[in-house]
Structures are given as structure tokens and as C-alpha cells.
Amino acid sequence: DEWEMGYGNPGWGWEAVRPYFNNMLDYTIGDSKTEPYGKGGEWRVEHPRVHWNVLDRFIEGAEEVGIPENKHLNHSNTSGVGYFQVNQTKG
């Protein structure tokens, strides 16, 4: 919203540009009716296919000291520890 309000660019606030981002996304996580992300676009977003023991142990250790696991780090709440969602179509 800084572009719109702070710099005087009407139509460049988040709510105005969000539809353009959502049209590009193919967000495979969650329900499209409750998630604020697009489906069917060219930019696929999904959970990583590969997990590493060292990272899984790190997540467990963080939870033991009170840092919550966050399975959805692309959401507005980025607090916690976990794997990021990725772009990995055919990769």
C-alpha cells in the first residue's frame, strides 16, 4: 500500500493488484474458497517434495523450546519454523 498511499500512485495498493498476482498462481495448498491465493495459473506453488532429516530435527528442536511449527509460511503469519512452499513443477 506504500506505492499507492505513500507515493501517490492510485490503483497500486495491495487490494488493487492482488487479482493480478492471483491470476498467475496455481496454489495447490488449501481450499481455494478459503485461501486468498489463485488456482490454475502458470506459477505453481506447493509443498516441497523432498524433506531432509536435519531440517526435520531442527523443526522438532525448535518446537521443544517453544517455537511453533508453521506449515504455511506464505501466509500473513510468518512466525514459527518450517519448510517454505516452493515452485517445482516438473523439477
Image (tube, rainbow, N blue to C red):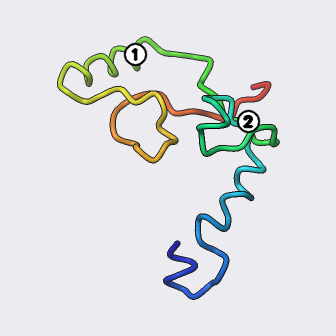
Residue 7 x/y as whole percent: 54, 86
Q: Which mark is residue 44?
A: 2
Residue 57 x/y as whole percent: 34, 14
The single residue placed furthest to the front in the displayed view is 33
Query: Could you say which quadrant of the image residue 14 lies in?
Result: bottom right
- Apparent side of residue 24 relative to residue 48 in the rendered image (left or right): right
Q: Which mark is residue 24?
A: none
Query: Could you say which quadrant of the image residue 10 lies in?
Result: bottom right
Q: Residue at the location (61% across, 64% down)?
A: 15
Mark nearer the N terminus (1 vs 2): 2
Query: Could you say which quadrant of the image residue 37 lies in?
Result: top right
Q: Which mark is residue 56?
A: 1
The single residue placed furthest to the left in the displayed view is 65
Q: Mark 1: which amino acid? A: Asp
| Closer to us: 41 or 35 | 35
| Closer to us: 75 or 91 | 75
- Apparent side of residue 31 relative to residue 39 in the rendered image (left or right): left
